[in-house]
Image (cartoon, grey):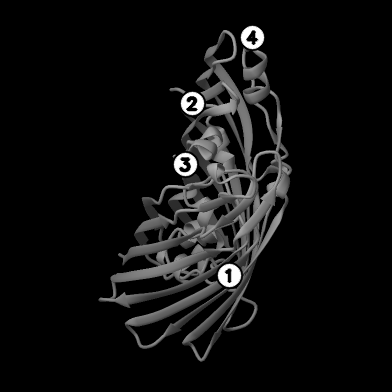
């Protein structure tokens, strides 16, 4: 299989990551997590606990649990207004995605529970058609799929732990083409995929009735891509077509949550996430031979500083059991972005965001439950001045709608 340098995408734009969380994370992967704006670590009452906090599998009713969700993501067009000349202005394409997710939890086996999850924890997509933006990001797209088996152990009615494996598959495409100097053009066309692995750890506690505490840690996954690319420039004999490699991090994430249930109906959860983006210091493409052209070397071979920063997210989620069949949910989050002004570009025009969400679950019978949730990610406008960008990004944001089905044997 081809693997690619296209990983610039991986670490620069994530399908929904560029619009749903800092950098390229996609925290919202199920009805409950979408409806509660990602505040979903301490109190996870469904099969999706296999992903969000596998230690909470220990508290589920003693039967098999299954969940299937379909996540629809709409990325708004981002407007760019350049401070130097209107000829550099641009607007990215509006984009739409469908992401199916699956979860399963086994019955109890001597205080052990086993779970599986299929999710899309990151990704990217950004396309620009105007001459100046497309010089740097004609297309950046990346899909990251994670398959995670996990096992939980319940010590007693108060404490449980869990561990799991992260099997991560990523494929992406990166294209750019334009005039880099008067009379000089350059382009690149890359695509490929890779498999990588990591781990996750989880802890859950119920010290008193109604109180849930949860901690999860997802390890960093280094995406070591190797593959092929085509690089060209009009300056001299400027063509390279061959192998290439690059390594970029899918960062570690630490989440702490506390939830309390009032009157057996109203559950409020507070959550803090720390995403360790500072591992993304630079991006450095490597080739088995010299590119043989100083223009290609300077554009596509020399290390490019990223210097991303660790970020914090603060989330609150609320769920209310209106009756035995109907549950209402809502959430709010404040999400920092990791990209400093010095390295922000057209591939990921990220900014701080506020997230607003609503959702509902309806229990049809003792086995089957349906749900739907909506989230709006409102990105702040951002003015940047660096070697590539000197202007203002506006109107960035995303709409997310999730439909889900839960089934208990």
Q: Residue at x 36, y 60 (%)?
A: 67
Camera-side mark, 1 or 2? 2
- Which percent across, then down, holds residue 147? 46, 45
Q: Residue at x 66, y 55 (%)?
A: 383
Residue that label 1 marks? 333
Q: CA distance from mark 4 to mark 1?
A: 49 Å
Q: Which mark is residue 190?
A: 2
Q: Which of disc 3 and disc 2 is earlier in sequence?
A: 3
Q: Residue at x 30, y 70 (%)?
A: 370
Residue that label 4 marks? 292
Q: CA distance from mark 3 to mark 4?
A: 29 Å
Callout 4 secondary element:
loop
- Callout 2: few (<14), some (14-19), or many (20+) C-alpha neighbours within 10 Å? many
Q: Judge left or right: residue 39 versus residue 402.
A: right
- Which percent across, then down, holds residue 333? 58, 70
Q: CA distance from mark 1 to mark 3?
A: 29 Å
Q: Which of disc 4 and disc 3 is earlier in sequence?
A: 3
- Which percent across, then down, holds residue 169? 48, 37
Camera-side mark, 2 or 3? 3
Residue that label 3 marks? 128
Taking the image as drawn, is residue 26 in sight?
no
- Callout 3: few (<14), some (14-19), or many (20+) C-alpha neighbours within 10 Å? many
The quadrant in which the C terminus is found is bottom left
Q: Judge left or right: residue 313 versus residue 307.
A: left
């Amino acid at each position: 299989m081809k693997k690619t340098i296209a990983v610039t995408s991986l670490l620069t734009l994530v399908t929904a990551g560029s619009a749903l969380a800092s950098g390229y994370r996609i925290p919202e992967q199920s009805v409950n997590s979408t409806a509660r704006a990602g505040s979903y670590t301490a109190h996870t009452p469904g099969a999706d606990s296999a992903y969000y906090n596998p230690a909470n599998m220990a508290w589920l009713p003693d039967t098999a649990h299954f969940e299937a969700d379909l996540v629809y993501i709409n990325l708004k067009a981002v407007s760019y207004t350049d401070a130097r000349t209107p000829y550099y202005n641009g607007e990215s394409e509006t984009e739409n995605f469908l992401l199916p997710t699956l979860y399963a939890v086994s019955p109890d086996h001597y205080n052990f529970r086993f779970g599986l999850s299929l999710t899309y924890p990151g990704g990217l997509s950004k396309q620009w058609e105007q001459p100046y933006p497309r010089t740097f990001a004609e297309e950046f797209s990346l899909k990251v799929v994670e398959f995670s088996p996990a096992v939980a152990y319940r010590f007693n009615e108060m404490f449980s732990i869990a561990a799991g494996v992260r099997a991560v598959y990523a494929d992406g495409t990166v294209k750019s083409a334009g005039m880099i100097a008067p009379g000089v053009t350059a382009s690149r066309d890359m695509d490929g995929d890779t498999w990588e692995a990591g781990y996750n750890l989880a802890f859950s506690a119920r010290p008193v009735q109604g109180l849930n505490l949860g901690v999860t840690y997802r390890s960093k996954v280094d995406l070591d891509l190797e593959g092929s690319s085509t690089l060209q420039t009009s300056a001299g004999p400027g063509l390279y077509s061959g192998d290439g490699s690059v390594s970029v991090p899918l960062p570690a994430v630490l989440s702490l949550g506390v939830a309390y249930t009032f009157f057996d109906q109203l559950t409020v959860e507070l959550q803090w996430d720390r995403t360790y983006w500072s591992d993304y210091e630079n991006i450095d493409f490597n080739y088995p031979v010299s590119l043989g052209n100083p223009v290609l070397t300077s554009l596509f071979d020399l290390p490019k500083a990223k210097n991303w920063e660790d970020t914090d997210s603060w989330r609150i989620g609320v769920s209310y059991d209106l009756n035995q069949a109907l549950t209402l949910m809502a959430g709010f989050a404040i999400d920092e972005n990791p990209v400093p002004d010095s390295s922000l570009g057209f591939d990921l025009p990220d900014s701080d965001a506020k997230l607003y969400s609503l959702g509902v679950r309806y229990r049809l019978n003792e086995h089957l439950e349906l749900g739907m949730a909506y989230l709006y990610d409102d990105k702040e406008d951002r003015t940047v001045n660096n070697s590539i960008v000197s202007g203002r990004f506006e109107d960035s944001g995303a709409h997310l709608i999730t439909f889900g089905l839960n089934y208990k044997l």
